[in-house]
Every structure is written in C-alpha cells, then in structure tokens.
Amino acid sequence: MPGALTSILTAGRFTPDGNLTLTRIQVQLSTTPSGCKTAAVIQVTDGTVGGTRTLPLQAAVSESGPVSINYAADVPLAVSVSVAAAGCKPVRKTRMCSSSTRGDNTR
C-alpha cells in the first residue's frame, strides 16, 4: 500500500462468487512507519463483527499469521484503513545496489 496511511480509506472492495475462507492477511508498505503514536490499522470485513479482522501496520511488512474467517458467496467484502496513522516520521526503505564488471583489462 502506498503512502503513510494518515487517512481512513477504502483500499478495495470485491464480492466473491463462491464461499471463501480468509487464511492470512499480508501487507507491504512503501513507507516504513517510524515512531508513530498511533499505528495505521488495515481491516478486512463483510460488515459483521464475526467477519471482521484487523491488522496494525507497525513495520514495512506486516502479517496476521494464520486466521480462518469464512465468508459467504455474494456478500461484499471491503479492505480498508480503519485507523489512520498519526504522529509518524516516515522513513523510506533503502535499496541495496551492487555493480560488477567483467572483462580483461590487461593489454
């Protein structure tokens, strides 16, 4: 997900054609949260208490671990930021770069 997630928003909606089971939530952020007073929280829901799972986003990569939430066919699901991040100092992820050359430099 892009940005610092400082706003509540719906990231996506879909309606499954068949029954499905949510087994894990994994989120990768393009900006690593740092020093947040309030961490952003992602939510997957069908609008019911039993069909709602949340995940605080406290690192560049967050995951729920194993879960098992059943959703019925033809019931809309939403993925959203249900709690906005606050008081954060964004830190960009660094990329490791390397280079090498090949060839014969002798003459």
Image (cartoon, grey):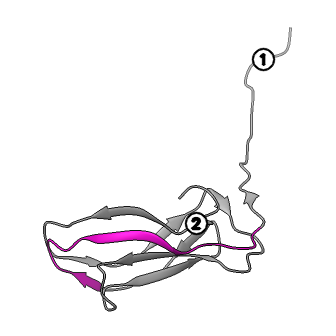
Residue 46 occupies quadrant? bottom left
Residue position marked by numbered label 2 in the rendering:
7
Residue 105 location (% of width, % of height): 83, 16
Q: Nearer the viewer, residue 6 or 67?
A: 6
Residue 38 location (% of width, % of height): 68, 80
Left or right: 103 in relation to 60: right
Image: magenta residue range:
69-88
Residue 63 location (% of width, % of height): 51, 75
Crowding near pointer 2: few (<14 within 10 Å), some, many (20+)?
Answer: some
Q: Nearer the viewer, residue 60 or 11?
A: 11
What is the C-alpha distance between the residues marked 2 and 1? 56 Å
Q: Is residue 20 magenta?
A: no
Residue position marked by numbered label 1 in the rendering:
104
**Circle nearer the viewer, 2 or 1:** 2
Q: Amino acid at mark 1?
A: Asp
Q: Amino acid at mark 2?
A: Ser
